[in-house]
Amino acid sequence: MLKINELLNNLEAELQRIVLDRKLNNPVMIGIRTGGVWVAEIMHQRLGFVEPLGLLDISFYRDDFSQIGVNPNVKPSRLPAHIEGRDIILIDDVFYTGRTIRAALNEIFDYGRPNQVVLAVLIERDGRQIPVRPDCVGANITLNAGQRIKLTGPEPLGIEVQTIHAAA
């Protein structure tokens, strides 16, 4: 059973360690909409970051929008004016195939070339499809076929394992 507070505590500890180990200098924290922003807001507060939290909506950078269409609730990204040469902590809720992170990196690099990007996720699950992997993880899980994990929130923040029923 996944407990949200334990996952948040694990992720916070991992982030504190990596900020020191990789000598991140005044990092910019960016959350991926929607669940990643919820997690990033908590980490931003816990780690005492002063610079405003960046928000990223990757809808236009997805590699499947030609198949599923553009999300009708697209919101603008809000990133700092200067990304060039900055250290970035990118936060998402669930890491699955890696495609969301690929899209997020594409958008970030459109704003400039950061010094380094640290990827932190609340949950990493099995199913990676491209060679991208998180640096910090609250928990690693394996799901059965037909299951997915979903962050609910933002108040209260929670986790659901859902079973997807295929159409007959």
Image (spheres, rainbow, N blue to C red):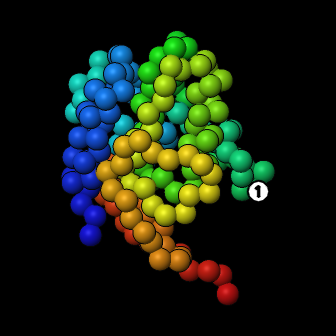
Which residue is at 45% across, 61% downward?
A: 125
Q: Position of residue 26 (x, y in %)?
A: 35, 16
Q: Position of residue 14 (x, y in %)?
A: 28, 41
Q: In the rendered view, does 160 fall on the left or right side of 14?
A: right
Quick one: label 1, few (<14), some, or many (20+) residues within 10 Å?
few
Q: Where is residue 150 in the image (x, y as percent from the top left)?
A: 43, 60
Q: Which residue, given by chain and number where applicable, does mark 1 sit on?
A: 67
Q: In the rendered view, does 121 fall on the left or right side of 96?
A: left
Residue ranking furthest to the right: 66
Residue ranking furthest to the front: 21
Which residue is at 62% across, 51% downward?
A: 130
Which residue is at 78% across, 51% downward?
A: 66
Q: Answer whether residue 80 is visible to the viewer in this image.
A: no
Which residue is at 65% across, 81% downward?
A: 167
Residue ranking furthest to the bottom: 168
Out of 38 and 106, give the one closest to the viewer: 106
Q: In this view, does 38 lie above or below 28?
A: below
Q: Where is residue 117 in the image (x, y as percent from the top left)?
A: 48, 30
Total labels: the figure holds 1
Q: Answer whether residue 123 is visible to the viewer in this image.
A: yes
Q: In the rendered view, does 57 fall on the left or right side of 162?
A: right
Out of 148 and 102, give the one closest to the viewer: 102
| The quadrant where residue 90 appears | top left
Q: What residue type is labelled 1?
A: Gln
Q: In this view, does 71 lie above or below 20?
A: below
* Secondary structure found at label 1: helix
| Figure quadrant of the C terminus | bottom right
| The quadrant where residue 19 appears | top left
Out of 66 and 85, give the one closest to the viewer: 85
| The quadrant where residue 50 appears | top left
Q: Is residue 51 above or below residue 75?
A: above
| Figure quadrant of the N terminus | bottom left
